[in-house]
Image (cartoon, rainbow, N blue to C red):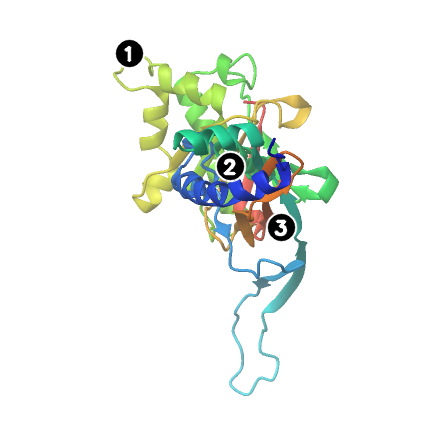
């Protein structure tokens, strides 16, 4: 008598095998890091909000005042003017998952081999790419802004004092390029009455690579090494200026020119809200596939102190 094959029972029978396998696969995925998408090295990531919070509210405070001479019996003591701004960031749900086919699972169970982990790795990669994009470019559909073009951040074009044929670094010497970098750092410091100093400088990857491979005159130093040692931040604090090259800045400036970004890397200045980092949900059966949904909730980038960030275009 022929035995009737019940596909539903077979799917359920293999479910335990898939669940055990995905637990192992996901543990490996969470340990893995993609250095080229290391946004956390440039932007503080805040995961402190409730994973299901609809919004994240924060306050930015500023104050201005000037002390002066008064009479011992005065009633008109100068006061500081304080401003407190309330901002609210919406949090949105996003997702990416992976899955296995019925045949793939059956063969793996029969042979006693592990299920392939490529799907989980690529799902995690897609998640990392989206967070990276939100950090630096934002997302118009959710009214999110990125670090490379944030409303309210001062942008200026680098100077051309007549010693070069244009403002572009391709037409400038290492000394003039270093002058442009220092002008950006000094401009940020001056605009905040010397309160803020940028400790991070992000260049278009194309400019970064050129500086790293171009020798400064007849010296053994590259232009990049010279700038690292001869900038106002390092001269003032004794600390190294963190100079990074990243894609996406080559046409961000005015007139689609290259832009560099200087800022103080601190949660006081900017942060990315990620109340729920990527988490994989329990395995689900969908037709002849075992699917593992992945979800995350993100609120986007907040630049809280816009004067502690500054752009320079035309490089």
Label 2's element? helix
In the image, residue 84 above or below residue 217: below
On the question of residue 159 being in view, the answer is yes
Going 44% across and 40% down the picture, which residue do you hit?
Answer: 21
Q: Nearer the viewer, mark 1 or mark 2?
A: 2
Disc 3/disc 2 C-alpha distance (Å): 18 Å
Q: Position of residue 233 (x, y in %)?
A: 38, 41
Of the numbered discs 1 and 3, the one sitting upstream in the chain is: 1
Determine which quarter of the picture holds residue 231: top left
Q: Position of residue 185 (x, y in %)?
A: 47, 38
Of the numbered discs 1 and 2, the one sitting upstream in the chain is: 2
- Residue placed under numbered mark 3 in the picture: 299
Task: Classify mark 1: residues with Cα within 10 Å, few (<14), some (14-19) or many (20+).
Answer: few
In the image, residue 274 above or below residue 35: below
- Residue placed under numbered mark 2 in the picture: 124
Q: Nearer the viewer, mark 1 or mark 3?
A: 3
On the question of residue 116 being in view, the answer is no
Which quadrant is home to the N terminus?
A: top right
Q: Nearer the viewer, mark 3 or mark 2?
A: 2
Label 3's element? loop
Q: Which mark is residue 315?
A: none
* Left or right: 287 in relation to 12: right
Which quadrant is home to the C terminus?
A: top right
* Left or right: 292 in relation to 216: right
Q: Position of residue 209 (x, y in %)?
A: 42, 19
In the image, residue 163 above or below residue 243: above
Going 34% across and 40% down the picture, which residue do you hit?
Answer: 234
Task: Classify mark 3: residues with Cα within 10 Å, few (<14), some (14-19) or many (20+).
Answer: many
- Residue placed under numbered mark 1 in the picture: 218
User: Which is more toward the observer, 47 or 303?
Assistant: 47
Question: Which residue occupies the extreme bottom position in the image?
Answer: 73
């Amino acid at each position: 008598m022929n035995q009737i094959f019940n596909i539903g029972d077979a799917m359920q029978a293999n479910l335990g095998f898939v669940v055990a396998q995905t637990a192992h696969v996901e543990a490996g995925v969470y340990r893995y890091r993609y250095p080229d998408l290391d946004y956390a090295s440039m932007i503080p990531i805040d995961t402190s909000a409730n994973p299901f919070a609809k919004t994240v509210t924060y306050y930015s405070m500023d104050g201005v005042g000037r002390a002066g001479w008064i009479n011992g019996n005065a009633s008109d003591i100068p006061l500081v003017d304080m401003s407190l701004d309330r901002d609210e960031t919406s949090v949105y749900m996003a997702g990416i998952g992976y899955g296995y086919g019925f045949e793939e699972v059956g063969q793996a169970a029969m042979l006693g081999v592990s299920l392939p982990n490529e799907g989980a790795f690529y799902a995690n990669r897609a998640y990392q790419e989206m967070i990276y994009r939100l950090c630096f470019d934002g997302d118009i559909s959710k009214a999110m802004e990125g670090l490379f073009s944030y409303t309210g951040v001062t942008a200026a074009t680098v100077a051309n004092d007549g010693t070069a044929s244009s403002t572009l670094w391709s037409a400038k010497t290492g000394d003039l390029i270093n002058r442009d970098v220092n002008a950006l750092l000094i401009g940020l410091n001056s605009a905040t009455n010397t309160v803020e100093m940028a400790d991070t400088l992000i260049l278009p990857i194309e400019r970064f690579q050129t500086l790293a491979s171009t020798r400064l005159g007849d010296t053994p130093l590259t232009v990049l090494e010279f700038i690292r040692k001869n900038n106002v931040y390092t001269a003032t604090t004794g600390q190294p200026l963190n100079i990074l090259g990243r894609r996406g800045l080559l046409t961000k400036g005015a007139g689609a020119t290259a832009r560099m970004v200087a800022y103080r890397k601190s949660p006081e200045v900017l942060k990315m809200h990620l109340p729920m980092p990527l988490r994989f949900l329990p395995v689900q059966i969908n037709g002849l596939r075992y699917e593992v949904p992945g979800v995350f909730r993100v609120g986007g980038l907040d630049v809280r102190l816009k004067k502690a960030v500054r752009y320079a275009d035309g490089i």
